[in-house]
Image (tube, grey):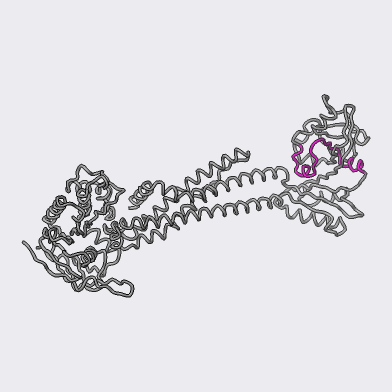
Amino acid sequence: MLRESVSMSVRNIAYNRMRSFLTVLGIIIGVTAIIALITIVSGVTGQISSEFESLGAGKLSVSARGTLLKPGLTEGDLETIAALDNVSGVSPSVSSTVVAKSEYGWDDEISLEGRNETYFRMNDGLVKRGRALNRLDMDAQTRVCIVDGALAKKLFFGVDPLNRTLLVNGHTFTVVGVLSDDSNRDVMSQARGGSDEKLIVPYTTALRLTGTAHISSLDVHVADTSRMDRVVDDLEDALYRMFNYKDDTYTVINMESLLDTMNTMLSMMTAMLAGIASIALLVGGIGIMNIMLVSVTERTAEIGLRKALGAEPGQIQLQFLIESFILSLLGGVIGAVLGVGISYVFAVAIGTDFRLSLMAIGLGVGFSASVGIIFGWAPARKASNLNPIDALRSA
Amino acid sequence: MSGAYFSMRDIVKQYRMGDEVQTVLKYVNLDLEEGEFLSILGPSGSGKSTMMNIIGCLDTPTSGDYILRGRKIGEQDQHQLAQIRCHEIGFIFQSFQLLQRMDAMKNVELPLIYAGVPAKLRERRAKEMLERVGLHDKLHHFPNQLSGGQQQRVAIARALAGNPTMLLADEPTGALDQETGKQVLSLFREINSEGRTVIMITHDLNIANFARRIVHILDGVLREGGKRA
């Protein structure tokens, strides 16, 4: 019986090909929109968060304006913070703009960064050639520096910069390393605008060079990121005490929570867009209901005849329900194929990952099929309740 | 004769049209033996279509008893009525009522689908029936490829497919010319001679005369017309 109903429905849909297509067009558009939106947004989100993760995972950024008497963190403060539970290291950052000169050339707007050995430990592959800065450099305030590719090209064009000297604000420094080209991927240094032509020196040296004893920028590396919140609490607690119980003198930025916020925002946006797209699905469903009602009216005589031949109301209802189900499922499948196609083209065009979201496909197709059943119900019910006499007389 | 086929006792059928109640059948009494060939003759508006609907279990009377092969029709539910229509009655309509989207075979198979007959058996039976009405070379023709007479013969094949005990025809020759009408009627006689009850509803005395027994209906009142051997 079910097989006959299905084959009868298919025959009906095929018989009214143009009308069937126009009927499911709404469903096709709705499902296409939902699948394309979800797939595209999830591809973009994935891309953004994986980039963010590689830059700031397990890291807290502290920025301390300090008070009038204490305009930043001291060496002692760094040690206190480094000793906090679950902290694997601290990496202070001192920045300044300097004039640099070598025997081959000069530049008066070089960004100088003061870093410690933790910075190099946490950022593998930062130094392409030569050596990184170490603990001894910090303690001895050595006058060594690491230059990036752009600066090397400017001050040491055509020669190997390693072990050559240069003057920074009049002080002699020895080049001990060259940064790799993608060393500017650090999101915080990008935010500070320090990209091209920079040199890194021991932070202790940098402090002396700039004439201060206070550090205003610091990265805190966390060992176990699952207990991040705890570290944030401890850190804020320590900073509160360091800055004389004034909580507006410092900020702690949790990269992880920034990422969370962004993900929440993106998924909210996805949900909103999908919600708008499902309005198309709703309209498509009403279209199906409309055409099924027309179909019931048109086929009044047929329904009456079927009843006269022994069809029960339930069988009539089932047949109409199957018809609207198949119709909307058809729309759902076509929409899914289109949606996946569009999002693939989009992903290739803007260069994001293409991730086939089974969830989105399931949602689109499942939603459209249930639209068929929900909106097919009333017309099917109407058909099954037709009085066979009225039905036959209308012919 | 092989016993009572159906009996109608004081059948009244009323339709409500707004505030007015229209009585279409007025205390109709009719008894039918199994294997009879009956014509119900009456002009349009006399209540003969209503008679057909009640006989065919498509509608139930307002009052009175209709007992078909021992079952009180007034007491059956939708499901049981569908079963009775399926197994006892073969319908023939003036306008054939074939489904245009299906070929002759599929049309004849339709009642068998609702009777739950398996596909293989269904096809064999449909083929048999179409051969029986002389359409062995038109099995896969669609209704619009057939003449009126041929279409009505497909309809007869469909009515007989479920092997019903009664053939119920509503103006079966109304849409046919004289010659093909006669052919259809002699087919009815043949079907009746096999022992199947045939009831024909018509407004045409010439057609009604093909039956062995005629009843007249006028303004909802039924009276016996006469019996022939």
A14 lies above or below A164:
below
Q: Nearer the viewer, residue A130 or A4?
A: A4
Residue positioned most to the left: B229
Q: Residue at x 86, y 47 (%)?
A: A215
At which x and y percent is residue B201?
18, 61
Q: Is residue A137 left or right of residue B229?
A: right
Whether residue A122 is visible, yes or no, is yes
Quarter of the rendering occupied by the C terminus of chain B: bottom left
Magenta segment: does it hold A29? Answer: no
Q: Quadrant of residue A288?
A: bottom left
At which x and y percent is residue B85?
24, 60
At which x and y percent is residue A26?
49, 51
Magenta segment: does it hold A192? Answer: yes
Residue positioned most to the top: A158
A383 lies above or below A141:
below
At which x and y percent is residue A199?
84, 36
Q: Residue at x 14, y 62 (%)?
A: B38
Q: Is residue A183 left or right of residue B227?
A: right
Tell me the magenta residue range. A183-210
Q: Nearer the viewer, residue A6 or A174?
A: A6
Q: Nearer the viewer, residue B201 or B43?
A: B43
Whether residue B125 is visible, yes or no, is no
